[in-house]
Amino acid sequence: MITNIEGIVLNIKNYGDTSLILDILTADRGIIGVMAKGCKSLKSNLRSVTDKLTYATFTIYYKKDKLSILSEATVINNFSNIKKDIEKISYASFLLDLTYQVYKQCENNDLYNLLISALIKINDNFNPLVITNIIELKYLDYLGVMPNIDGCIMCGSKNVITLSSDKGGYLCKNCRTIEPLVDKMTIKLIRMYYYVDINKISKLDIDKKIVFEVNSFIDDYYDRYTGLYLKSKTFLRQLLDKIK
């Protein structure tokens, strides 16, 4: 059956000398495997639409639960700003890898819209670290390991003063022991990141110190509770170390 499917290429694998297998996250069919025959040939009309980050409408010979065959693709957004900036590319690559891993665990089609919205914002020059942290925090819900951001993780008090990745969320004055204090805005932003609609973000004016505090919490939380260790994340950490 020939059909048109909107999606984005999360991953590519070599198949023979001239072909690729694409893992495409689609708007309504989850991740599907698609064969792009002969796409590595210089003369192939598929050559420019079979890279990671290709966001397009794909015309395919669809085979449910089997490898489909790519016929052609019409690009929806080529993410030109991302592709010419090594920092943006690094964040985008990590989001593709993370989405692939999260989808394998929860198979929720909401991930598609979250990913596309994030990539559009990064392409529109919004702070890629902030956008990535927003996605990371939202994904924790789908992984089933969301930190407690409604009150103190120990007693439920709303009068929280810091947060702890080790204990799993916010802490109040009475329950805090050796955990370092964070800025009040860091506490507010964690909650805002979770509830914000990415599509409605029009401005990101956040102090650099706060951005890094939020990122530090999310990084540590992922290490402790998700079991996800991605090479693209390691590279991002090295990139951030140079910026700090």
Image (cartoon, helix red, strand yellow):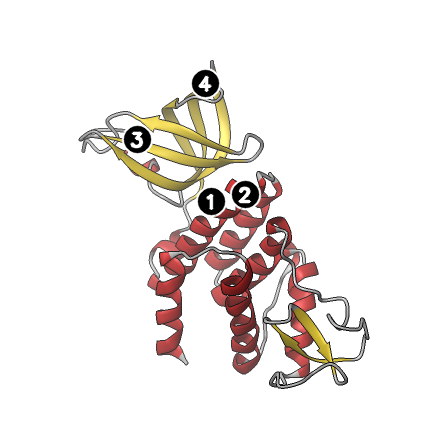
Disc 4 residue crowd, few under 14, some 14–19, many 20+, Cα 10 Å: some
- Position of residue 32 relative to residue 214, above or below, is above
**Earlier-in-chain disc, 1 versus 2:** 1
Spatial separation of the CA atoms under disc 1 and disc 3? 23 Å
Find out whether the residues at labels 4 and 2 contact each other: C-beta distance under 8 Å.
Answer: no
User: Label 1: which residue?
Assistant: 100
| Residue 147 rendering spot, x and y as whole percentages | 66, 63
**Mark 4 residue type:** Lys
- The quadrant of the rendering that contains the C terminus is bottom left
User: Which class describes the residues within 10 Å of circle 1: few (<14), some (14-19), or many (20+)?
Assistant: some
Q: Which residue is mark 4?
A: 63
Q: Is residue 204 visible?
A: yes
Report the mark closest to the observer, 1 or 2: 2
- Distance from Cα at disc 3 to Cα at disc 2: 30 Å
**Residue 6 location (% of width, % of height):** 51, 33
Lower position in the chain sequence, tag 3 or tag 4 = 3
Q: First in sequence: mark 3 or mark 2?
A: 3
Dot 3 alpha-carbon crowd within 10 angstroms: few under 14, some 14 to 19, many 20 or more: some
Say whether disc 4 or disc 2 marks the residue closer to the N-terminus. Answer: 4
The residues tagged by marks 1 and 4 sit, at their Cα atoms, a distance apart of 20 Å
Amino acid type indicated by mark 2? Gln
